Amino acid sequence: EKGGYDYFMLKEIAEQPKAVADTLLGRIGTDGRLTLDELRMSDADLRAVDKVVIVACGTAFHAGMIAKYAIEHWTRIPCEVEVASEFRYRDPIMGPGTLVIAISQSGETMDTLMALRHAREQGAKVLAICNTNGSTIPRESDAVLYTHAGPEVAVASTKAFLTQLVACYLVALYLGQVRGTKWGDEILAVIKELSDAPKQVEQVLETMEPVRELARSLADAKSVLFLGRHVGFPVALEGALKLKELAYMHAEGFAAGELKHGPIALIEEGLPVVVVVPSPRGRSILHDKIVSNIQEIRARGARTIVIAEEGDEAVVPYADHLIRIPVTPVLLQPLVATVPLQVFACELATAKGHEVDQPRNLAKSVTVE
Ligand code: F6R
C-alpha cells in the first residue's frame, strides 16, 4: 500500500505532481479560462463579494496565508486570513458581501468547523476547500471546491497542501476573471503557467538528493530557522512546522524583514538558516532585500541554506548550500519552494530515527476544539 516507499509520507511527497494535475483537471477550459461551477455562485454574486475571510489550521492555514497574497493582487478584494481557533472568539465583522473560505484536508477539523458555523450564523457565505468527499466541513458549507490529492495517510500534510494552494489560486483567478480586474491579461497568463505546475514539481523532486544529504548532516542541530518574504513567508512557516512535527526540533519561521526587529539575536555560529528567496524578476526589490539578509546572517555565523530560482546568481556567494527551484510566476513559487522543505524535514526526522508517518502526540484529524 506504500507503493514501494518506506513511508506514506515519501509516497505522498512523490505523488504531488499527480495531485496537482488532478486538482487542475477539468477546471481550465480550452479557451484558457477557468470554469468553476462548483462554487455555486452566480457571476453577479461573485462580483458582489467585498471581503474574503480565510479560516484554517496548521498547514491549511499556511495555504490560506499564501491565498491572501494571490486574492488581493489578482482581484483587489480585501482578504483576511486567520487561524480558525481564534476566529469566532473575537467577534469578527462579516456582512452579506463576505465570502468565507474554510480550508481543510480532512473536512473534520473542529476548530475550522466551528469557525464556519459562526460565519454562516452571521450571514456570510462559506466556500470549503477540502480533500475529503462528503466530510462535515463541505456538508455544512454553501459550496465546496474539492482538492484531488487522493487519500493522505501520513500525519504531516504534503500533497494536500500543494493541492490546497492550487485550489486557492483557482478561486483567486476565477474571482479575478469574473470581476474583470485590471490584471485581466496577467490572469490568463497565470492560468496557463499554473497548468505547468505538475511538470515543475516533478522537476524539483528529481533534484532532491543533495537536500536529503544535507538533512542527514543536520540531524544533531539544536534549532533551524526559516526566513521568507511575500509568499515565501508562509512557505518558511510551513518548513518550520514540518520540522517541528516530524523531527521534534526547535524550528521557527520568520518574515525576513522582521529579522532586525529581534530574531537576528538568535543567530550564532553554525546555526542552520533556510532562506526562501523571492524571484529576482517581478518584485525584485524584495529579492535584493533578502540577499542583504542572507549576507547579514552569514556574517554572524549562520550556515545558510538558500532556496532560489534557477538563474538567480546574486545569492551564490552567500549560500553555504544552494537549492535550485524552477522559474515560476511570483505568486506561484510556493508550489515549488515548499517541496524541498518537505523532503528536508522527512529526511532529517528519519535520520533521527523518528517514525515520520505517525509523529508523537499528533493525530491526522483533530476533532476537538
Ligand atoms: C501539518 C498538519 C496539520 C493540519 C491541520 C489542519 O502537517 O497536518 O497542521 O494541516 O491540523 O488539518 P485539516 O486540513 O484536516 O483541517
Image (cartoon, rainbow, N blue to C red):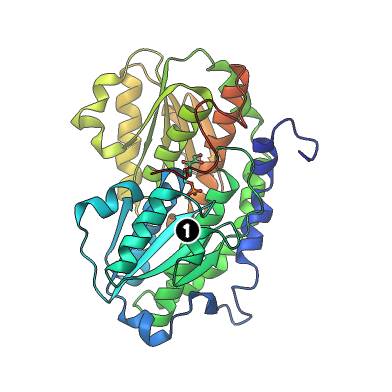
Is residue 68 something one can see in this rendering?
A: no
Residue 117 higher or lower than 75, as above or below? above
Q: Residue at x 31, y 61 (%)?
A: 118
Quadrant in which the C terminus appears? top left
Is residue 362 something one can see in this rendering?
A: yes
Q: Indicate the quadrant where residue 52 lies.
A: bottom left
Q: Is residue 47 left or right of residue 323?
A: left
Image spot of residue 319 (x, y percent): 45, 28
Q: Indicate the quadrant where residue 147 lies.
A: bottom right
Q: Is residue 306 left or right of residue 32?
A: left
Image spot of residue 40 (x, y percent): 48, 79
- Disc 1 crowd rating (10 Å Cα; few below 14, some 14-19, many 20+) is some
Residue labelled with disc 1: 329
Q: Residue at x 39, y 61 (%)?
A: 70
**Tag 1: amino acid:** Pro
Which of 77 and 86 lies nearest the eye of the viewer? Answer: 86
Q: Residue at x 27, y 76 (%)?
A: 96
